[in-house]
Image: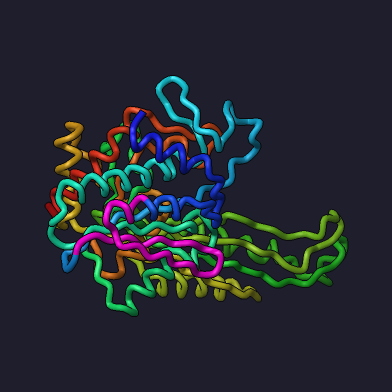
């Protein structure tokens, strides 16, 4: 078929369920060495990371991606084996083809072609890959690599993230920012007892209910021109002993804020704690901030370049969005880096029968190479 097709298939066949890499990064590293890149394999804990660069000085443009995938789920539910790439009806099926081994393969091919055509390009072009993007903690992936970058004075000016961003066709949506994510495990403490003697117990479910109603009804901010309003969600709520005649002694709830630049994490924490105190709850909160909101402004050089490339290649004026969840771009942006996400259609990511249109997979290297040419040729 093509270089990008063959490499995508090679990657999909490797069962790199997070945080396993299953040999994806050595395979890519060997290719990039042959193309003249300098390679560093950075392993932290159970996580493999690859840092590849070509050129010297600045400015620096990097591509960012991950080789790990989410579990396939029941393999019998797939029309074809999830780790055996299969073509049906003009689409390539397999776990990770869209999120994001297709993009990773396209980035590698684009970089190989770019440095072969422009061996004396200005500045540096690079590729940063991790095997720990899909995991729940992400401590030893891009987060840890950025700590190293800061320690050695590494500067990154522009970052293209290959996350699947498109809605219906390649280039119809790019992400120019992301909301922050602030989570907490809330424990509400009560007194266990018999349901027939509530005066001798304290039901944490009843105690929490009014506070929960206020948390859900609170308007945390109004958003702004770049972001929707901050949202509050309860993702898990657990209490009870398993018996219907026992008042539980404790309730646990997982809460999450997806917040915009109109709010700060410390203010959301303080307001949440004030509501809980107002309802006289005996509770504890264990907070976790997994990413601050970030935005590449409309005048950003990279943002303008990606928009121009989508217009030229596909005749599309892409939607410029800050929606969706989080990505590893949240670790790069605080370095003062412009971050833009552009990749294939995201309709099947994390699903059974994940797939990507073959025509769009073939177009991806051209998109990433065109960005390189605009920024560094």
Q: Quadrant of the N terminus?
A: top left
Q: How many marks?
A: 0
Percent across and percent down for residue 89 are 44, 20
**Rendered position, 79 above or below 243:** above
**Rendered position, 188 above or below 79:** below
Residue at coordinates 50% horizontally, 74% vertically from top-left?
274
Left or right, residue 163 beside residue 123: right
Q: Find the magenta span and give its range.
A: 31-55
Q: In this view of the protein, can residue 339 be seen by the observer?
A: no
In the figure, residue 198 lies in which quadrant? bottom right
Q: Residue furthest bottom?
A: 151
Residue at coordinates 48% horizontally, 31% vertically from top-left?
93
Residue at coordinates 42% horizontally, 64% vertically from top-left?
41
Q: Is residue 130 magenta?
A: no
Percent across and percent down for residue 24 are 47, 50
The residue closer to the viewer here, 355 or 203, is 355
Q: Main secondary structure of the magenta part?
A: strand
The residue closer to the viewer here, 17 or 250, is 17
Q: Residue furthest front?
A: 34
Percent across and percent down for residue 158 are 23, 60
In the figure, residue 309 lies in which quadrant? top left
The colour scheme of the drawn protein is rainbow
Q: In this view of the protein, can residue 252 be seen by the observer?
A: yes
Q: Is residue 41 magenta?
A: yes
Left or right, residue 209 beside residue 346: right
The residue closer to the viewer here, 143 or 304, is 143
The residue closer to the viewer here, 26 or 212, is 26
Percent across and percent down for residue 306 are 20, 47
Left or right, residue 28 beside residue 118: right
**Rendered position, 365 above or below 353:** below
Residue at coordinates 39% horizontally, 49% vertically from top-left?
324
């Amino acid at each position: 078929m093509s270089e990008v097709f063959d490499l995508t298939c090679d990657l999909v066949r490797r069962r790199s369920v997070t945080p396993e890499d299953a040999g994806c990064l050595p395979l890519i590293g060997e290719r990039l060495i042959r193309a003249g890149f300098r390679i560093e394999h950075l392993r932290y804990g159970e996580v493999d990371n690859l840092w590849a660069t070509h050129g010297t000085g600045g400015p620096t443009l990097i591509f960012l991606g991950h080789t790990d995938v989410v579990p396939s789920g029941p393999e019998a539910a797939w029309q074809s084996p999830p780790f055996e790439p299969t073509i049906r009806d003009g689409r390539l099926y397999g776990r990770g083809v869209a999120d994001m081994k297709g993009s990773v393969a396209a980035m590698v091919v684009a970089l190989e072609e770019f440095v072969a055509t422009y061996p004396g390009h200005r500045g540096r072009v690079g590729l940063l890959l991790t095997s720990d993007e899909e995991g729940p903690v992400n401590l030893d992936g891009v987060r840890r690599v950025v700590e190293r970058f800061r320690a050695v004075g590494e500067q990154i000016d522009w970052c293209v993230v290959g996350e699947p961003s498109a809605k219906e066709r390649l280039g119809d949506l790019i992400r120019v920012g992301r909301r922050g994510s602030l989570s907490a495990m809330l424990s509400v403490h009560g007194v266990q007892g018999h349901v027939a003697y509530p005066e001798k117990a304290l039901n944490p479910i009843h105690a929490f209910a009014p506070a929960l109603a206020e948390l859900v009804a609170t308007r945390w901010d109004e958003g702004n021109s770049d972001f929707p309003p901050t949202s509050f969600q309860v993702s898990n709520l657990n209490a009870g002993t398993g018996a219907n005649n026992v008042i539980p002694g404790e309730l646990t709830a997982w809460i999450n804020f997806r917040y915009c630049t109109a709010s700060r994490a410390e203010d959301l924490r303080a307001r949440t704690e004030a509501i809980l105190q107002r309802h006289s709850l005996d509770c504890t909160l264990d907070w976790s901030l997994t990413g601050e909101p970030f935005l590449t402004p409309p005048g950003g050089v990279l943002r303008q370049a990606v928009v121009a490339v989508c217009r030229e290649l596909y005749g599309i004026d892409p939607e410029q969005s800050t929606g969706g969840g989080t990505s590893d771009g949240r670790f790069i942006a605080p370095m003062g880096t412009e971050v833009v996400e552009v990749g294939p259609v995201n309709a099947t990511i994390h699903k059974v029968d994940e797939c990507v249109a073959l025509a769009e997979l073939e177009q991806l290297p051209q998109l990433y190479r065109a960005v390189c040419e605009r920024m560094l040729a």
